[in-house]
Image (cartoon, rainbow, N blue to C red):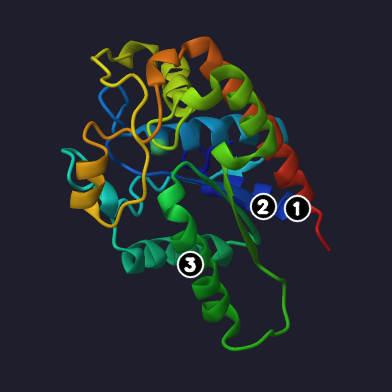
Amino acid sequence: MRLQMMTWAEVEASVARDSGILMPIGSTEQHGPTGLIGTDALTAEVIAWRAGELADAVVGPTIPVGMAHHHMAFAGSMTLKPSTLIAVITEYVLSLAHHGYRRFVFVNGHGGNIPTVNAAFYEVYAALYGHGPVEGPELRCRCISWFELPGVQRLTKELFGSKEGAHATASEISVTRAAFPDTVKSAPLEPAQAPISRFFDARDYRRRHPDGRMGSDPSVASAPAGRQVIDTAAAELAAAYRQFGTMG
Ligand code: NI
């Protein structure tokens, strides 16, 4: 169930049964010549919605813009400073905690968000508990990046081998092709497999990765592969959600 499609009375009844919630978080940033700007937000929400169906869990509104400073040399990319993203996540969680939610599983679609999301969890704990534990129901937060799930990693290795890459990956572009078949883009990919190296900032990123991709060859992306990735990621997430919900 998507929180946005529920009434307040439905939310009130459902939180009394299950105080967990899935929270998709993505990014709005370039994904190479053939990937959608919204890839990281779209993949996180498609996978979270499916996991929500499997686990009978509520899915909160997607946070669509993340920490993507290093992609800002490409048109269409947007970023929040880490401090802004921490504030956004903290206030999303505290708002929902006010209504009784206690287990937050963030479904993340963007590697660049990970340190900031985890920092935000400690802002939440600090806001609730000050500098030490207090009485009352415990609130717990967890961040799961769908592309890091072990079953997904096995599958992408099997499907794409070394063509998967690290940004504008074959798997994430496959997921958007499966979910949004009308948006398939074609453009030359030269070289077929993009370079991959460390970088420092947005300008340096573009210098080292001129078309935006990092290490990937998304010409192998396909809708059927994307459906497999969605199913695998959603099943693993649903299992992780159920387990998280029953932790002591
Ligand atoms: Ni991405």
Q: Residues within 10 Å of mark 1 (few under 14, many from 20)?
A: some
Determine which residue is flagged by label 2.
20
Cα gap from disc 3 to disc 1, whole angstroms: 20 Å
Amino acid on which disc 1 is placed: Gly
Residue 239, x across and y down, in percent: 75, 39
Answer yes or no: do the residues labelled 2 and 1 have beta carbons within 8 Å?
Answer: yes
Whether residue 202 is situated above or below residue 28 in the rendered picture: below
**Element at badge 3?**
helix
Residue 182, x across and y down, in percent: 33, 11
Sequence-earlier tag: 3 or 2: 2
Q: What's the mark number on residue 227?
A: none
Determine which residue is flagged by label 3.
120
**Residue at 40 percent of width and 22 percent of height:** 217
**Which is nearer the eye, 139 or 106?**
106
**Element at badge 2?**
strand
Determine which residue is flagged by label 1.
245
